Image (tube, rainbow, N blue to C red):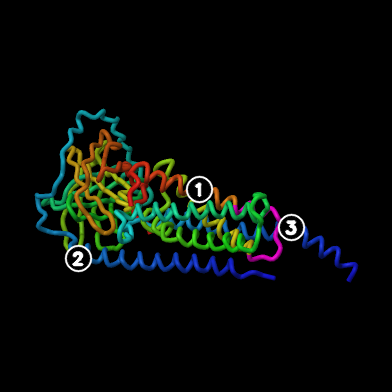
């Protein structure tokens, strides 16, 4: 036992990047798959409209804004969990906040993403739509990778912050290239 | 200690996405059915709305008279390497544009109001054969350097058509726009006389296209939104799955 323990301890302390690569591969497939679907199918669909909103685009813009605000909560709670904000003591509530804000955030993005993919597709017409299309695919790829990583027992310490940062970056870029664009061109409408 | 909560989150996202996708597909199907019921109005006749632009004032690009290949061996070798044709059915019910390139053919027919179809097919020898995605609209005919002629079949009806070979800026144009979250596609036929006919399609609904000036394709606006206009040739993909 004593002979094998150190080895297994070492393996436990320093898990190799293999698991990350596998999860990353699955996430990459998801991202590429979404892009291919958005590119090859014929986009024609009405915006699903919710009562009280002027248009489907307004709905999407506000949903994306909600998601972006929750993603800011994600960033803050993650920094508390990793002890980067000294003034707030990490506790179980921080983890719960991080989990639930993340769950709500990603679920809120789903109707938006389905509309984007189904009704509009992967577009390359302008820099904004190209970046938005790329980040949209990238976002769900990194999200899938992060969920798969979380589900594994041993992953390198750098992997979750890295993936979290990627998800945060993608969501911010998506929000800037959609909601901010909509609100600045169409006004702050509901 | 494996945690399955992330997998549950993942599954919830997939399930929600699938639910929205199914809902979208079903409402799309319902919308398409109601609109195809009103397809091809034979009374459209010469009321087909089209605009005329003066192509003469446009810098005439050197007519790319693609020399017919010395087609000696294979009978299936296309009679015309690359050409665009534009014209009308005999009673001006539908305007027709066909572009061929290296044996591949794309086509567009529309009445300028509420009927249109995109087609893809082949030019084998001088024989043209094109079909729309749903198979309801077909073009069969012949094509040579000067003109193309044949039959358009749509919604169970047949029209004979004649289309002359044209050089840019006449030909076949496609426009795409995102009108407040609704993807809109426009097709235009520009004949050698400068007659522009087109239909805009979005969410299964069709309406007359905005005015296209082939001299300024970037200036097309639909409901206040700029339309991205491209000139199509026989190699373009017009039917997506």
Q: Do the CB atoms of the residues marked 3 and 1 lie less than 8 Å apart? A: no
Residue displayed at 26% across by 51% down: B108
Give the alpha-carbon distance from disc 2 to disc 3, as whole Å: 61 Å
Q: Do the CB atoms of the residues marked 1 and 2 lie less than 8 Å apart? A: no
Residue displayed at 44% across by 64% down: B17
Q: Which residue is situated farthest in the right direction here?
A: A2
Q: Mark 3 points at which residue?
A: A16
Q: Which residue is situated farthest in the front direction here?
A: A87
Q: Does the magenta stretch include residue A152?
A: yes
Range of magenta residues: A151-164
Subunit that carries the residue with mark 3: A
Q: Does the magenta stretch include residue B149?
A: no
Is the residue marked by circle 2 packed among few (<14), some (14-19), or many (20+) residues within 10 Å? Answer: few
Q: What element carries label 3?
A: loop
Residue B229, x across and y down, in percent:
31, 42
Q: Is residue A3 visible?
A: yes
Q: Is mark 2 on a helix, strand or loop?
A: loop
Give the side of residue B7 with respect to residue B166, left or right. Answer: right
Q: Mark 1 points at which residue?
A: A172
Subunit that carries the residue with mark 1: A
Q: Front-most of B81 and A166?
A: A166
| Quadrant (top left, top right, bottom left, bottom right) of the C terminus of chain B | bottom left
Residue displayed at 33% across by 52% down: A190
Residue B113, x across and y down, in percent:
17, 52
Looking at the picture, does residue B145 appear above or below residue B159? Answer: above
Q: Front-most of B28 and B114?
A: B28
Q: Name the residue under label 2.
A: B37
Give the alpha-carbon distance from disc 3 to disc 1, as whole Å: 30 Å
Q: Is mark 1 on a helix, strand or loop?
A: helix
Question: Which mark lies nearer to you, 1 or 2?
Answer: 1
Residue A171, x across and y down, in percent:
50, 51
């Amino acid at each position: 036992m004593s002979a094998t323990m150190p080895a297994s301890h070492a393996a436990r302390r320093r898990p190799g990047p293999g698991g990350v690569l596998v999860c990353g591969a699955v996430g990459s497939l998801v991202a590429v798959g979404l892009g291919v679907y958005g590119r090859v199918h014929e986009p024609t669909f009405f915006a699903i409209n919710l009562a009280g909103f002027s248009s489907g685009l307004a709905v999407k813009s506000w949903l994306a804004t909600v998601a972006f605000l929750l993603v800011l909560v994600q960033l803050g709670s993650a920094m508390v969990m990793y002890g980067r904000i000294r003034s707030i003591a990490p506790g179980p509530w921080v983890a719960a906040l991080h989990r639930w804000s993340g769950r709500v955030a990603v679920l809120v993005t789903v109707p938006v993403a389905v509309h984007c993919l189904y009704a509009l597709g992967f577009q390359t017409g302008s820099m904004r739509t190209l970046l938005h299309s790329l980040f949209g695919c990238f976002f769900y790829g990194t999200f899938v990778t992060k969920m798969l990583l979380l589900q594994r027992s041993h992953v390198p310490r750098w992997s979750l912050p890295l993936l979290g940062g990627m998800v945060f970056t993608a969501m911010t870029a998506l929000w800037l290239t959609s909601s901010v664009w909509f609100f600045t061109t169409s006004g702050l409408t509901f | 200690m494996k945690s399955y909560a992330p997998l549950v989150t993942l599954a919830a996202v997939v399930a929600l996405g699938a639910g929205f996708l199914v809902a979208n597909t079903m409402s799309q199907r319902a919308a398409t059915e109601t609109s195809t019921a009103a397809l091809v109005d034979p009374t459209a006749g010469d009321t087909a709305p089209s605009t005329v632009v003066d192509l003469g004032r446009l810098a005439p690009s050197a007519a790319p008279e693609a020399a017919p290949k010395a087609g000696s061996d294979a009978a299936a070798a296309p009679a015309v390497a690359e050409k665009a044709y534009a014209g009308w059915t005999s009673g001006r019910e539908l305007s027709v544009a066909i572009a061929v390139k290296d044996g591949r053919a794309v086509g567009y027919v529309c009445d300028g109001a509420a009927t249109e179809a995109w087609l893809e097919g082949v030019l084998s020898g001088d024989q043209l054969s094109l079909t729309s995605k749903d198979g309801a609209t077909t073009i069969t005919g012949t094509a040579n350097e000067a003109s193309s002629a044949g039959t358009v079949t749509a919604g169970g009806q047949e029209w004979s058509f004649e289309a002359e070979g044209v050089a840019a800026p006449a030909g076949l144009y496609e426009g795409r726009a995102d009108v407040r979250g609704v993807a809109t596609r426009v097709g235009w036929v520009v004949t050698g006389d400068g007659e522009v006919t087109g239909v805009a399609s979005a969410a299964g609904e069709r309406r007359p296209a905005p005015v296209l000036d082939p001299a300024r394709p970037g200036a097309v606006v639909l409901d206040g939104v700029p339309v991205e206009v491209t000139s199509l040739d026989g190699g373009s993909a017009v039917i997506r799955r």
